[in-house]
Image: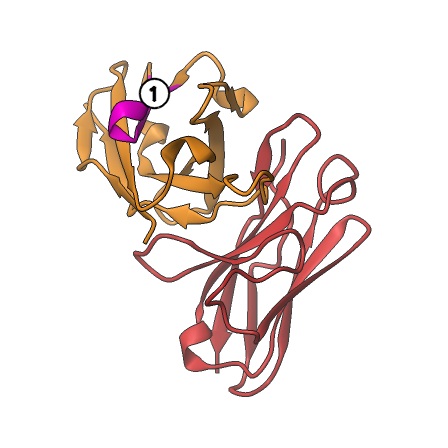
Amino acid sequence: QVQLVQSGAEVEKPGASVKVSCKASGYSFTGYYMHWVRQAPGQGLEWMGWMNCNTGDTNSAEKFQGRVTMTRDTSISTAYMEVSRLRSDDTAVYYCAGEDCSGGSCHQSFDYWGQGILVTVSS
Amino acid sequence: QSALTQPASVSGSPRQSITISCTGTSSDIGSYNWVSWYQQHPGKAPKLLIYEVSNRPSGVSNRFSGSKSGNTASLTISGLQAEDEADYYCSSHTSSRTYVFGSGTKVTVL
């Protein structure tokens, strides 16, 4: 079955960068889009960006443009997201979520989710 | 892009039906049939319930149904059960090829 397994929790200082990973299994990695969604403590979901795992094309929410970089390594079916210039309000659980486009069309939804990674930004 | 508007909380008794609304604009919900709904239990990752306004993925109970009218989408939970107590989020594709989530609704089973 489809599984997205994310890397472990991170603690970073303000101004630093963090790179989180999301390893996919159980499906054709390049047949999906990968989205990144975050959730600050006690808050709602916030969409950050998507990456076409086949072409590497990306798009992100305006507030994250210039600060978020999404990449992938198709040889190991793993997607990455790096957030730079971290601030305290970047403290959140970060999820990867796969969108199934393998049938030739996409549902424009987040079909499968990773378990989430807590990133804490603190001095 | 502002979050879609959902009621903060909705409650109902077991076996009742409840409806959660999700209001956007003509740049998101009003222009696309790409509205999806998610259920999130405390400490867990969200789970897809509905995609493309009204379609259920395999394995999702038929007690969950979705609809849309104009700039507002809705999720109905029929035959409410204790396990349905969770947070629910809507999401929509937008005109700038991005996505936006709703503010979230806490469902309480009385």
- Specify the color scheme: by chain
Residue drawn 24% across the image and 15% down it: A16
Magenta residues, dominant SS class? strand
| Chain A: colour as depicted | orange
Residue drawn 78% across the image and 40% down it: B31
Residue A112: % across, % down: 41, 48
Packing grade of label 1 (10 A; few <14, some 14-19, many >=20) is: some
Which residue is identified by label 1?
A83
Residue B61: % across, % down: 51, 73
Q: Quadrant of the N terminus of chain B?
A: top right
Figure check: B10 above or below B47: below
Give the total of numbered labels. 1
Residue drawn 55% across the image and 64% down it: B9
Q: Residue furthest right?
A: B70
Answer left or right for A37 relative to B97. left
Q: Which residue lies furthest to the bottom in this view?
A: B15
Residue A48: % across, % down: 47, 30
Query: To which chain does the residue with label 1 belong?
Result: A
Residue A29: % across, % down: 37, 34
Q: What stretch of residues is rendered in magenta?
A: A70-83
Q: Which of B99 and A62 is in front in this view?
A: B99
- Give the image quarter of residue A76: top left
Q: What element carries label 1?
A: strand
Q: Which of B97 and A86 is in front in this view?
A: B97
Q: Which amino acid does label 1 sit on?
A: Val
Figure check: B11 above or below B47: below
Q: Nearer the viewer, residue A46 or B94?
A: B94
As drawn, the chain in red is B
Q: Is residue A34 visible?
A: no
Q: Nearer the viewer, residue A42 or A112?
A: A112
Answer left or right for B71 relative to A65. right
Q: Is residue B63 visible?
A: yes
